[in-house]
């Protein structure tokens, strides 16, 4: 049986092509992974970012929370946050595991506690009559 000289080169070419295709698929999948910051922006920021106009922040401020926004909170317990996300609380709807996985909730929690507290709101200057 006669072997062709180009057969070995063809096998190497096919192997390299397959490797390149798998590497491209792998990196494309890696790019679709969403981190805690992105999920926070998608699911939490609309209600829980600092400042006026965020319903969750305004409600927490009304209830006397020392830091009404979630960003930078160091007093949040992961189990409590997980429970609130799964069960909902007052105006906050629950999120099903098909909407946010436990791993994604953990990433959001890690993002929240890793941030710095927003600057304290300055008291308005009072006009003093001279």
Image (cartoon, rainbow, N blue to C red):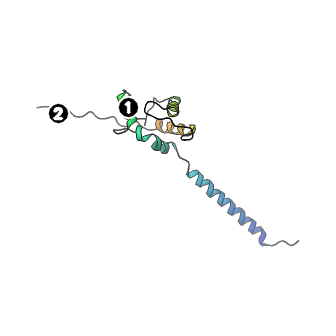
Q: Residue at x 45, y 44 (%)?
A: 41
Q: Nearer the viewer, mark 2 or mark 1?
A: 1
State the image coordinates of residue 67 (x, y, percent, origin top left): 39, 31
Determine which residue is flagged by label 2: 127
Q: Depth check: 122 or 34 in front? A: 34
State the image coordinates of residue 34 (x, y, percent, origin top left): 53, 46
Determine which residue is flagged by label 1: 59
State the image coordinates of residue 21 (x, y, percent, origin top left): 65, 60
Residue 1's place in the image compared with 86, above or below, is below
Residue 129 falls in image quadrant:
top left
Whether residue 50 sits left or right of residue 108 in the image: it is left
Task: Kindly report the distance in space between the C-alpha atoms of the residues bearing marks 2 and 1.
Answer: 30 Å
Q: Residue at x 71, y 66 (%)?
A: 13
Q: Residues within 10 Å of mark 2 (few under 14, many from 20)?
A: few
Which quadrant is home to the C terminus? Answer: top left
Q: Residue at x 86, y 73 (%)?
A: 2
Residue 24's place in the image compared with 128, above or below, is below
Q: Residue at x 77, y 72 (%)?
A: 6
Q: Secondary structure at mark 1?
A: helix
Whether residue 70 sits left or right of residue 101 in the image: it is left
Which quadrant is home to the N terminus? Answer: bottom right
Whether residues under marks 2 and 1 lie with C-beta atoms below 8 angstroms apart, the answer is no
Q: Secondary structure at mark 2?
A: loop
Q: Depth check: 2 or 40 in front? A: 40
């Amino acid at each position: 049986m006669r072997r062709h000289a180009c057969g070995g080169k063809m096998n190497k070419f096919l192997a390299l092509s397959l490797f390149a295709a798998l590497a491209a698929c792998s990196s494309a999948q890696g790019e679709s992974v969403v981190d805690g910051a992105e999920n926070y922006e998608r699911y939490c920021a609309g209600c829980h970012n600092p400042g006026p106009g965020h319903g969750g922040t305004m409600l927490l401020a009304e209830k006397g929370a020392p830091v009404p926004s979630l960003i930078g909170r160091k007093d949040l317990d992961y189990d409590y946050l997980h429970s609130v996300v799964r069960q909902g609380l007052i105006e906050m709807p629950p999120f099903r595991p098909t909407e946010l996985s436990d791993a994604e909730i953990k990433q959001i929690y890690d993002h929240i506690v890793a941030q710095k507290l927003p600057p304290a709101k300055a008291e308005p200057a009072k006009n003093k009559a001279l």
